[in-house]
Image (cartoon, helix red, strand yellow):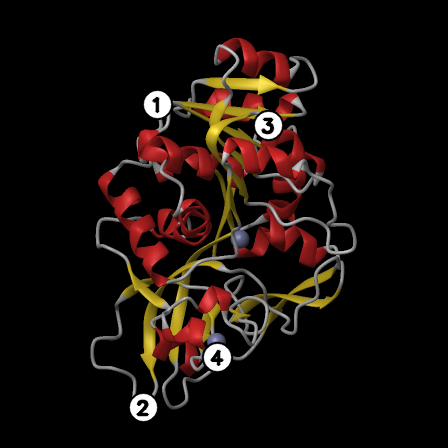
Amino acid sequence: MLAAMLKSPGNLTMENVEVPQPGPGEVLLKVDACALCGTDKRVLAGEKPVSVPIIGHEIAGTVTAVGPGVAASIKVGGRYAVQTVIGCGDCPMCKISRENLCEKGFTAIGYAYNGGFSESMLMPKNAVDQGCLIPIPAGMDAEVGTLLEPLSCGINGLRDIPLEDMRHVVVIGAGVIGVLNGLIARARGAKRVSIFNRSQDKLDVIAKLDLPFDDLINMSKTDPDAWIKEQTGGRGVDCVIVSASVKSLGSLGMGWLARNGHLSLFAGMPKSDSIEPIDLNLIHYRELHLHGANSSVRRDYLEALRFLDSGKINGKSLITHRFPLQEFAQAVKVQNDSRSGALKVIIKP
Ligand SMILES: [Zn+2]
Ligand SMILES: [Zn+2]
């Protein structure tokens, strides 16, 4: 089978490797589609280490073989999206199906196990046992199925935020993660959703795709403080979702919140530089709420599936480019080129 093999950081080659055979409890998938993600870019650049040569974690595939002992419900021909996160199964967090918060640290498909930039991939037994195969409906395209992973992460991060009651939500960051967070806010009933970004190119992509947002604000041209004051009569917005890895955005966004407002720190910050001073009295007197976000679990995938299947979120509208596996290098180039108009780039092996 053809696979994109990462030999060392920055050094990726297309190779023909042997198709893995499923052992006890394992499942072999033919990869129907695997999307490129911002994290892949960091892995390819050597900024994020992985322990396997085949990456790719936004995966939809079809079962082609099952090993002995796999549950009878998983059959050859079944179509699934792949849940990335695998917990230890034993700690208090795993015991309540929150493997994303596994106290021993979760492992993940595409990082600790070979992922989807390959014609076939093996689901390990611990992933199969945990329920990491998420069935996708017959009518759903595999490429839309790849959106379950990033969408589920947004759903997890926003889970405890009462978006349904909100008049105004601001998302900082116009990349695909910002877009997905904005779409979740919209689908859950937020009345007004504004996307902020520091450069125009990504805002232009969103405008061109005609995504359902109320405002696309270029923060380097429009003063965001003044804009929010003016638009909200000085009271501030109900929620700010930080979807860009710039730590000052956390304190900036907090300053834009109305009383009883919610701040979601969706984006992780550089590990070597994650300290940011904040005014604790803002939290105290305005009774603000803070939210983290760390990957996702099965319940989030199932909810993502409902949003996509019902059309509350139009998955197709986010996919701008498709490439065969042979053109992986070209796909990465398009994804990284801010002028290419790319939002979601899909590899179809
Ligand atoms: Zn991803
Ligand atoms: Zn655990």
Amino acid at the residue labelled 2: Pro
Disc with the residue nearer the chain's start (4 vs 1): 4
**In the rendering, at what x and y percent does residue 179 appear?**
48, 34
**Residue, disc 1:** 191
Q: Is 334 in front, or is 187?
A: 187
| Residue 342 appears in view | no
Q: Is residue 306 above or below residue 219?
A: below
**Residue, disc 2:** 68
**Residue, disc 3:** 202
SS at badge 2: loop
Disc with the residue nearer the chain's start (1 vs 3): 1
SS at badge 3: helix
Disc with the residue nearer the chain's start (3 vs 2): 2
Mark 2–mark 4 distance (CA, rounded to whole Å) = 22 Å
Cβ(mark 4) to ligand 2 < 8 Å?
Answer: yes
Q: Is 116 in front, or is 166?
A: 166
